[in-house]
Image (cartoon, rainbow, N blue to C red):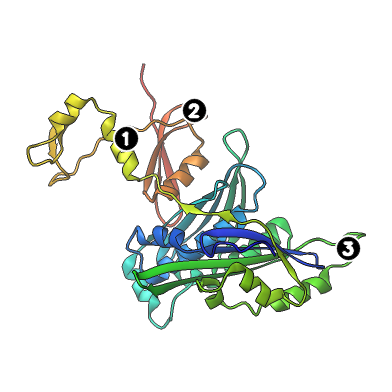
Amino acid sequence: MTDSLPTDDLTAAFQIEGWPVRGRIVRLGHVVDDILSRHAYPEPVANLLGEACALAALVGASLKFEGRLIVQAQGDGPVSYVVVDYDTAGQLRGYCSFDAEKVEAVSHGFARPGAKTLLGKGAFVMTIDQGPEMDRYQGVTPIEGETLALCAEQYFAQSEQVPTRVVLAVGELETAEGKSWRAGGAMIQVIAGDEARGDTRDAWDHVQALFETLGEDELVDPTVSPETLLYRLFHEDGVRLFEAKPLESFCRCSQERVVGMLRSFPEVERGEMTEDDGVIERKVGPITVTGDGPLVVREKSHAGAPMTLDQALYEMELVGHDFYLFVDKESEKPSVVYRRRGYDYGVISLDVAD
């Protein structure tokens, strides 16, 4: 075991001593609370997004290159999609799109409806993005079961042929400061047998049996450290915990971005925008807009490199909008991708006249 790790907002790999099984554990405190508290998610939806955050950190932290892992599930249910973006710097962001009335309707009779109930018929997708110079790798499997852990296990079995077990947990705990969301997860994978290791199936069965004793409450309990949790599971065999990777939440819709946008205007223009009461007023086309209404008109200008349609689609999902404006990398045309029904999308491109 390593020296004592922080309790929260980290992911770390571990190795079962003497057995061809590797694993990873993740603990999320402030990070997941920040992500789930940004929007008024009903409890079942927040739980689903919390699972996706823990899963993205578990899988993404194992990437051996600089890039991103996007975990997404979308379907025809009350939750149209959940998407989490993890980059190899340890940053997480996520969003859910849902119909509140439909979520409430399917929640009757459930302590907490899970993935299959909320998402309905659809697909679970993991996308690995190694940057603009490399093609994205994407694996798609059907949504199975009431937890994203089952979707992930099926993904690894089908896409990578690696026997995998995953446990995910999300909970809202009462603290001195009020209620706070927490999440955790653990994953184990068997290392394929070879001439040196021989057949690894018996070892895998042994470690799986121990792993199945892991309780969801243990994964979100702030008083149980990662070291203690792993010791409880594997103390008879011994377990080696490697250096932890810290995690943090991030969002592009930050106060710094808004301040930066306002600073991009000359001081004279900023002064002209501001009324005596401090409300910003400016001319947008032929319309004078004061503050945010009653007529809401906003003018935005974004700098961005041309991107593929696939990249634009995922950026749209991550910001939680129903459309996304971009410059198509292949055609070099201004374009917009937009949501239609279910998980169908449309694209409009603009031919610029000379």
Question: What residue would you read off at disc 2?
Answer: 331
Of the residues under marks 3 and 1, which one precedes in the sequence?
A: 3
Q: Residue 176, how many percent across, how many down?
A: 35, 72
Q: Quadrant of residue 132?
A: top right
Identify the element where label 1 is drawn: helix
**Cα–Cα span, label 2 and label 1:** 31 Å
Left or right of residue 297: residue 65: right
Q: Is 168 in front, or is 113?
A: 168
Mark number displayed over residue 260: 1
Q: Is 50 in front, or is 17?
A: 17
Identify the element where label 2 is drawn: loop
- What type is the residue that disc 2 sits on? Ser
Q: Residue 340, how many percent across, how many down?
A: 39, 51
With respect to residue 47, does 290 lie above or below?
Answer: above
State yes or no: discs 3 and 2 in contact (Cβ < 8 Å). no
Q: How many marks?
A: 3
